[in-house]
Image (cartoon, helix red, strand yellow):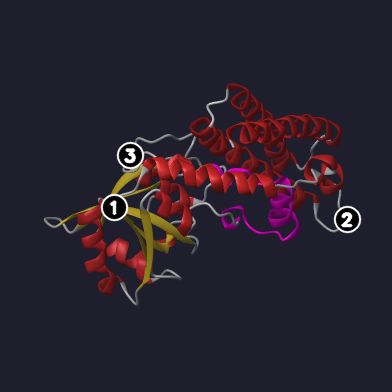
Amino acid sequence: MTDDIHSYDRDLYGRLFLNCYQRQALVMLAERVPDVPLLFHRCLISTDDLLDQVVRLQRPKYDFTSRICSADDLALIGLARADTTFASYAEARPLLKESVSRDGYVIVVGDVFYWPHCPEYRTRHLMHTVILRDHHADSGEWSIIDDNPASVLCAYRYPEELIADGFDNGELREVRSFTLRPYDPGEAHRGTRESFSALLADHRDSWTLFCEVEAILDSPWTARERAIAALYDVFSLYQGSRIALRAYLHRAFGDEAAGTLLDGAVQQAAGVQNALLLGKVTGAVDPAWLAGACRGLRETEEKLVDRVRTLDKEAA
């Protein structure tokens, strides 16, 4: 199967932080609404939150809970989200065709077991989303967009019965769409700035992740391979959240110093993640090196938060 890569910003809309649905939705919305990066003001996520959800609660990376794409934030940029559950694909079909005709796409929740481009095809049942782009009445096929095995969004074309199989055998049988409404870009910028300012005022971080990474790695309550895998996910989420935060701060402040600090944080986190990836393969990570790298990350993150607080006060 040949991959037809969809054109999008693979750095900003990557899978480090965003799950499959968030990334698909934001890529489609960004093609229609230029202010989508304003939604990333929610990406000032504390390392305490990352540690709590992924390490302590052992929540899968794709289930990390954040307020990205909350209804209030979407409304600021003229978007209303609708999630509709159906008993079957046949019942959902009219809405799918209507949404694609009106909006140019619709997102469906289904099961990867039935879709040939997915690595889990015919081997594993797993809930997943795909974008439907066009229904071809002459052939009865759907054009879709979804990840290839390298997590790059690509276009595929499937017989309608394959889409129906994935939908009918999924856990949710849900259709997700967004309605575009007129909005005031100036109000959108002001609204997200106010929201970000409130978020920043409440932002607290103990830096336990960075200060106690060796203890996390060597915890007697967690198998070493599980600790390495969890930390790998934590630093993926951290890295991706800072890439997205950089896009928002550029829009809000255009501050070069904050951008430089965020670039540094992303690069440092990528180095830690690469070491943990090697650890996932070999089962070993150098604790002293990891602790040193995390000390550097803490310094960068503290400078970043201080800089953003200064910008926020100056802009008030």
Residue sitting nearer the eye, 143 or 259: 259
Q: Quadrant of residue 242?
A: top right
Mark 3 — residue?
A: 2
Q: Residue furthest front?
A: 316
- In space, the residues marked 1 and 3 are separated at their CA atoms by 22 Å
- Name which residue lies at 54% across and 38% down: 244
Q: Is residue 186 left or right of residue 182?
A: right
Q: Quadrant of residue 65?
A: bottom right
The secondary structure making up most of the magenta span is helix
Q: State the mark number for residue 300.
A: none
**Three-letter amino acid code of the residue under disc 2:** Pro
Q: Is residue 48 left or right of residue 254?
A: right
**Three-letter amino acid code of the residue under disc 1:** Tyr
Residue 83 against residue 185 in the figure, above or below: below
Residue 48 in the image, given as x and y percentages of width and height: 74, 50
Q: State the mark number for residue 105.
A: 1
Q: Quadrant of the N terminus?
A: top left
Q: In front of the other: label 2 or label 1?
A: 1
Q: Is residue 111 left or right of residue 101?
A: right
How many marks do you count on the picture? 3
Earlier-in-chain disc, 2 versus 1: 1
Q: Which residues are magenta?
A: 41-64
Residue 157 in the image, given as x and y percentages of width and height: 27, 50
The answer, for residue 264, to whether it is visible in the render is yes
- Name which residue lies at 33% across and 39% down: 2
SS for callout 3: loop
Q: State the mark number for residue 220.
A: 2
